[in-house]
Amino acid sequence: MKLRFLAFFAAAFLFSCGKIPDVRGFFPKETSGGGDSTFHTASNNSEIAGIALRARDTFPLFLHHLRRPGIGERDFRVKYPFPADDGSGFLREHLWLGDIRRGEESYTGVVLNIPFYVSGLSKGDRTAFNTGEITDWMYIRKGKIIGGRSIKYLLEQIPAAERNAEEQAVLDMF
């Protein structure tokens, strides 16, 4: 269930209109405030580590499309690991950033998730990020997800017989 939730949690912040499934209403309310929930993964997951390395290696391709979007390209996002608060029990919290812009000395993005373990940062805040530390990137091209390997990986961990229609619809976008 937690794996399923993580996959949809990530997907919910990626898609907003068109033929893309609206999965925002799917999430259980696990927090007392009824907002976003979170999922904890092992820091030694080699598949997730490989996805992060590939995202950094291919980031120039992402930037090319961000700067010159082709027909039907939209919803450009990066996943970034923010240092978690002392005492939280975690080293980092990975959050999706949208509205990516190049500043004078760094890139910035708008936080798309509600941070649970990073105080001083809220959903909707614009924050700087180091491109050498991103853990995933994605955008939509004509209704298909380009990049987003962490989302695909997590959805594939749900056995096909147990995936619901929304989960399968997102997976079919790859």
Image (spheres, rainbow, N blue to C red):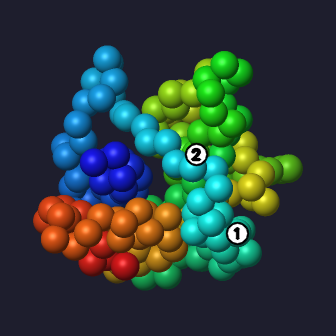
Furthest toward the right, the residue is 105
Point out residue 106 in the picture as x, y percentages from the top left corner.
Answer: 80, 51
SS state under label 2: strand
Residue pointed to by mark 1 = 53
Left or right, 43 with respect to 8, comes to: right
Relative to 25, is 48 above or below?
below
Mark 1 secondary-structure assignment:
helix
Dot 1, crowdedness within 10 Å: few (<14), some or many (≥20)?
Answer: some
Q: Earlier in the sequence, mark 2 or mark 1?
A: 1
Residue for point 65% across, 39% down: 92
| Front-most of residues 21 and 10 | 10
Q: Residues within 10 Å of mark 2 (few under 14, many from 20)?
A: many
User: What amino acid type is highlighted by mark number 1?
Assistant: Leu
Locate residue 45, reporting x and y percent.
59, 60
- Decide if residue 142 is in sight here: yes
Q: Position of residue 23 (x, y in %)?
A: 23, 53
Task: Please name the residue that numbered disc 2 is placed on.
Answer: 94
Which residue is at a point 37% across and 34% down the rendered structure image? 37
Q: Determine whether 31 is above or below 9 in the image.
A: above
- Answer whether labels 2 and 1 touch (C-beta < 8 Å): no
| Residue positioned 43% across, 38% down in the render | 38
- Residue at 26 percent across and 59 percent down: it is 17
Quadrant including the C terminus: bottom left
Between residues 46 and 20, which one lies in front from this camera angle? Answer: 46
State the residue in front, 65 or 164: 164
